[in-house]
Amino acid sequence: MTYIPAPDRYGKMEYRRCGRSGVLLPAISIGLWHNFGNITPFGVQQSILRTAFDNGICHFDLANNYGPPYGEAEHNFGIHMDRDWRPHRDELFISSKAGYDMWDGPYGDHGSRKYLISSLDQSLKRMHLDYVDVFYHHRPDPDTPLAETMGALDRIVRSGKALYAGISNYPADKAKIAIDTLRKLGTPCLIEQPNYSMLDRWIENGLTDVLREEGVGCIVFAPLQNGLLTGKYLGGIPADSRAGHDPRYLKPAAITEGKLKKIAALKQIADARGQSLAQMSLAWVLRDKVVTSALIGASRPEQVIENIGAVHSAPFTAEELAAIDAALAL
């Protein structure tokens, strides 16, 4: 059956300016990291993407090695593209990345010009696309000159294979140099993608200042700390949770009593605000307008609906922010 999007979809989402660019991104974006490989039925994937778009999420985020296995998320997205999204391509903002290990040999990892350009060519073939809207270098490479990596991003944009360039997982000092380098090349850095949550606030130690000063957008991943900030682990480890069935990215040992104490206190604050812990956690990372968007993952459509509720959260009071800081200090 032909997919017909909800006609009122854009009225359900907040859109934020990405730095000082012309790009608006939804406050909540969908990441195809872990649940769009071979572990998730294709129909469930389709329902997640359709639900997201029906509620105004027009940014789909991928990378070359998303799966599992590597490349499978992009491969599956190519099928979704042909079945659902081709008529809506100009409404979508699609991203991919390269910088982590992808294929064997000396040219399938890190930040060389050869790797980045070859990887994007492969990604476009898997996704059945002519271009992506933004292409990221996925992490700093200590062994490749930053000028080479940024030069590759510049070349990619000038070739038309990406409309914008981005960086991911760059600390403040390296981000500043990368942004300056791209600007001098004539291809401004659109956006940085770091991890950020109430339990991991590292970007507040300089990176957000750089992005604000430079007019670069910020889209944060893992705002729910791999599910910890949903509260699902307060009663133990559910069998269908990430820690329960695939602990590669959230090991049971990481769910400590200390973290659970903080999370329980945070949940009480969320309850008092009349929202779920996940919604409050997303609203918290979005409280600073330097954060353009928060990337969510979802294993079922209902999670998308719940998380979008964060967009309609009441602003935090000074007392609530102080209570959150006190809970995190437990």
Image: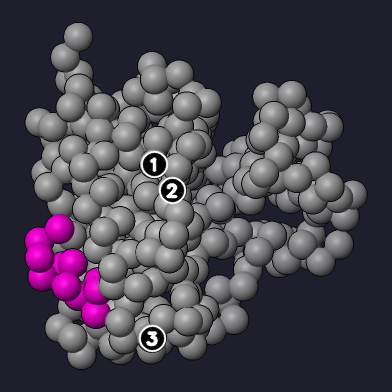
Task: Looking at the picture, tell me which residue is in the foreground, 326 or 4.
Answer: 4
Q: Is residue 239 above or below residue 298?
A: above
Splitting the image into 4 quarters, where does residue 119 fall? bottom left
Q: Is residue 176 above or below residue 57?
A: below
Q: Main secondary structure of the magenta part?
A: helix
Q: Residues within 10 Å of mark 2 (few under 14, many from 20)?
A: many
User: Left or right: 5 with respect to 284?
Assistant: left
Q: Residues within 10 Å of mark 1 (few under 14, many from 20)?
A: many
Residue occupied by mark 2: 65
Structural distance between the alpha carbons of marks 2 and 3? 23 Å
Look at the picture and state if 210 lies above or below 30. Answer: below
Q: Residue at x 43, y 32 (%)?
A: 36
The magenta stretch is: 151-161
Residue 71 tag number: 1
Q: Is residue 13 visible?
A: no
Q: Residue drawn 24% across and 63% down? A: 117
User: Which residue is at 24% across, 39% downward?
Assistant: 127
The residue under label 3 is 145
Q: Earlier in the sequence, mark 2 or mark 1?
A: 2
Any part of residue 83 in sight:
yes
Place of residue 308 in the rendered image (x, y in percent of width and height, measured from the top left): 44, 39
Question: What colour scheme has been applied to the protein in the rendered image?
Answer: one colour
- The disc, 3 or 1, on the residue closer to the chain's N-terminal end is 1
